Amino acid sequence: MERSYLLKRQNKRYAVIVLAACVFCSSMMLGGCAGSLKKQKLPVATYMGGNNTITEICKELRSAGVSNVDIFQEWVADFADSAGKNAELKDSWSDPEKMKADIGKCMDGWETKHDYSDADCRMTAFLLLDGLLWAQTTEAGYSGTYLMFDTEAIDNADRYEIIKRNKDMFTTLYGEKSVTDDKHPERTFSDSWEQYGFQIDSDRISLLSIAIYDPDSDVIFVGHTGLLIKYSDYYLFVEKIAFEQPYQAVKVHNMDELLSILSQRSEYFGEEGEAGPFVYNNGEYVGTLKKNH
C-alpha cells in the first residue's frame, strides 16, 4: 500500500515536471515566433560597426545576387575594427536622423592602421556591381580632375585591383560630363547613361546616384552613389558615405523617404539658387534633392 502510494506520487510529480517543461518550451517557441515576426520600425539605419550588423547586411546582399560580398565584408570589417572602434560606431540599428559619426575620429582610426587610402562611395558601389553593370562602350582614358582621389587610390593599392581592371568603365560612369542643355542640366547624366549603353543585369538591384552641378565649369559629376535593393515592402540602401567615413545601410519604406534622409547632408548642395543636386536610379532622373534646413 505504501509502495503504491509512493509510485502514484512519483508519477504525479513526473507529470507536473513534464507539463511544466511543455509549457516552458511552448512559451519559448511562441516568444521566438513573436520576435521573428516583429518588424523593424522604418526608416532605420546602421553604420555596421560590428559583426552582427555586418553579417546581417552581407546576408541580404548575397540573397539579392550582389557581387563580391566577401570582399565588401572584409572592407567593412576592417573599417569597423579601425576607424569604427576609434569613433565608437555602434553595431546596431538606429533612427537615421539621430545618427552622427565623429568624422575626425574615423579618419584618425583609419590612418593609424593603414598606409593606403580608404574606399569611397563610388568605389564601393562599383565593387558590388562587378559583373552586373555593363556598358556598350567607354571613354578611353580619363583626363578629368573630379575623380582624382578615386583614381589615385585605385592605382596605388592592390586592394582595389578588381576596380582597376574596369577603370575605364568606372571613370566613364562617374566622371564629369559637360552640360549641353543649360535649361535642363538634369538630363546630362541620363544622356550619358544612354550614350554609353549602361545597364544592370538585375530586376531588384539598381545604382542610385546623386549628380552635382558645378556652374563654374558647367559640368555634372557623380558626387555620391550607393546600391539600392528592392524588397516587397521596403528598400535597402547600402553606401560608403565618403573616404574615411562610415559604411551605412538604410532601410526605408519608399524612395521619397530615402531622398529625405539624403537631403540632410549639406555637402551635396551648392550655393542658393544653383541647380541640383539631381538624383538618378540606373540613369533615370527621379528628382532633385531639397535642402532640409
Image (cartoon, rainbow, N blue to C red):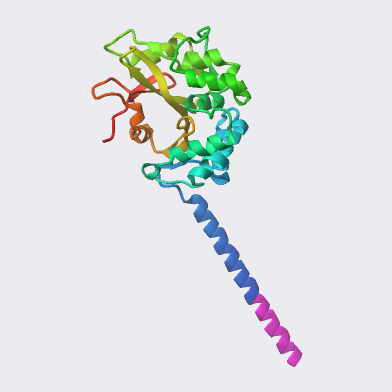
Residue 160: x and y, percent? 59, 24
Q: Which residues are magenta?
A: 1-15
Above or below 46: residue 221: above
Above or below 107: residue 98: below
Q: Nearer the viewer, residue 208 or 90?
A: 90
Quarter of the N terminus within the rendering:
bottom right
Task: Say which residue appears at 53% left-offset and 19% top-offset.
Answer: 152
Q: Nearer the viewer, residue 182 or 208?
A: 182
Observer able to see residue 49: no
On screen, residue 73 versus residue 93, left or right, reads: right
Quarter of the C terminus within the rendering:
top left
Report if residue 7 lies within the magenta region.
Answer: yes
Q: Nearer the viewer, residue 143 or 24?
A: 143
On screen, residue 157 versus residue 218, left or right, reads: right
Q: Nearer the viewer, residue 152 or 293?
A: 152
Report if residue 214 lies within the magenta region.
Answer: no
Q: Point out the residue furthest to the bottom here.
A: 1
Q: Point out the residue furthest to the left here.
A: 273
Instruction: State whether the magenta stretch is mostly helix, strand or loop.
Output: helix
Residue 166: x and y, percent? 57, 16
Task: Say which residue appears at 48% left-offset and 27% top-offset.
Answer: 121
User: Which quadrant of the view contains residue 175?
Assistant: top left
Residue 110: x and y, percent? 54, 36
Observer able to see residue 155: yes
Above or below 118: residue 4: below
Residue 254: x and y, percent? 38, 35
Task: Say which residue appears at 47% left-offset and 18% top-offset.
Answer: 147
**Numbered label tally:** 0
